[in-house]
Image (cartoon, rainbow, N blue to C red):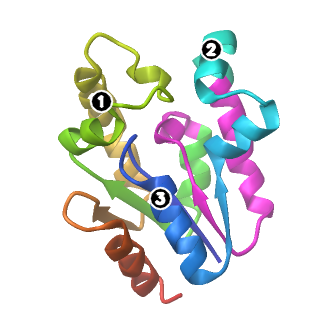
């Protein structure tokens, strides 16, 4: 059994993934963290030295690798839905959760982070709004469950996911 967590930056994918992993006693495969570990570089360093196109290609490779995994939570990056190949892959997965949250919440949750290369702009809130609008339909298209991380705690969201998928 695998559960995929999708959503914009700051929606809680990594934190909720960790909670689910602990509650269900299964591993967490956090794609961004796996990439950072294997390339021995932060996402910010990867973007700066190799570019976003390189990162997206690696991100796709790691998503496809999850096909070999059993019993785990997969926390994806916010931009995973930008690649058609990833959408096709996720469409065929049974347990895909869209952690939706307002741009205001995204901004609050990311405003002090230096680990978000796409937000190193003069107007990060505008960037978050633009990315949200660009990716929203794709998140909706591949998810089987949508939860608002604005209106619930991470613990409540994890419990809703467990109940929804009967795990």
Residue drawn at the location 41% of the way across and 86% of the way down: 163
Find disc 2 in the rendering and name its residue: 51
Kind of element beneath mark 3: helix
Find disc 3 in the rendering and name its residue: 15
Quarter-wise, where is residue 74 in the image?
Answer: bottom right
Is residue 83 magenta-colored? yes
Residue drawn at the location 61% of the way across and 12% of the way down: 48
**Residue 96 seen by the camera:** yes
> Disc 2 versus disc 1: distance between alpha carbons?
19 Å
Marks 2 and 3: CB-CB under 8 Å?
no
- Among the two numbered marks 2 and 1 on one chain, the one whose residue lies closer to the N terminus: 2
In screen coordinates, is 106 left or right of 14? Answer: left
Quarter-wise, where is residue 138 in the image?
Answer: top left
Q: Please tell me which residue lies in front, 26 or 61.
A: 26
> Disc 2 versus disc 3: distance between alpha carbons?
26 Å
Give residue 147's position: percent from left, percent from top. Answer: 30, 65
Give residue 44's position: percent from left, percent from top. Answer: 58, 22
- Among the two numbered marks 2 and 3 on one chain, the one whose residue lies closer to the N terminus: 3
Kindly report which numbered mark, 2 or 3, lies closer to the viewer in this rendering.
Answer: 3
- Among the two numbered marks 1 and 3 on one chain, the one whose residue lies closer to the N terminus: 3
Find disc 1 in the rendering and name its residue: 128
Q: Please tell me which residue lies in front, 16 or 165.
A: 16
Question: Magenta part of the protein: which range?
Answer: 55-84
Give residue 33's position: percent from left, percent from top. Answer: 66, 44
The quarter of the image holding the N terminus is bottom right
Is residue 1 magenta-colored? no
Marks 1 and 3: CB-CB under 8 Å?
no
> Disc 1 versus disc 3: distance between alpha carbons?
19 Å
Kind of element beneath mark 2: loop
Give residue 9's position: percent from left, percent from top. Answer: 40, 40
């Amino acid at each position: 059994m695998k559960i995929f967590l999708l959503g914009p930056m700051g929606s809680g994918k990594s934190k909720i993934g960790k909670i689910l992993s602990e509650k269900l006693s299964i591993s967490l495969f956090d794609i961004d963290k796996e990439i950072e570990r294997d390339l021995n570089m932060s996402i910010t360093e990867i973007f700066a030295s190799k570019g976003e196109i390189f990162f997206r290609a690696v991100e796709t490779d790691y998503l496809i690798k999850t096909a070999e995994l059993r019993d785990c939570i997969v926390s994806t990056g916010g931009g995973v839905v930008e690649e058609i190949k990833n959408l096709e892959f996720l469409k065929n997965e049974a347990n895909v959760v869209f952690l939706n949250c307002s741009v205001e919440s995204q901004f609050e949750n990311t405003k002090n982070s230096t680990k978000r290369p796409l937000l190193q702009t003069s107007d990060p809130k505008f960037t978050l709004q633009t990315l949200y609008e660009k990716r929203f339909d794709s998140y909706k298209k591949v998810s089987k469950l949508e939860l608002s991380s604005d209106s619930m705690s991470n613990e409540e969201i994890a419990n809703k996911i467990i109940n929804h998928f009967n795990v």
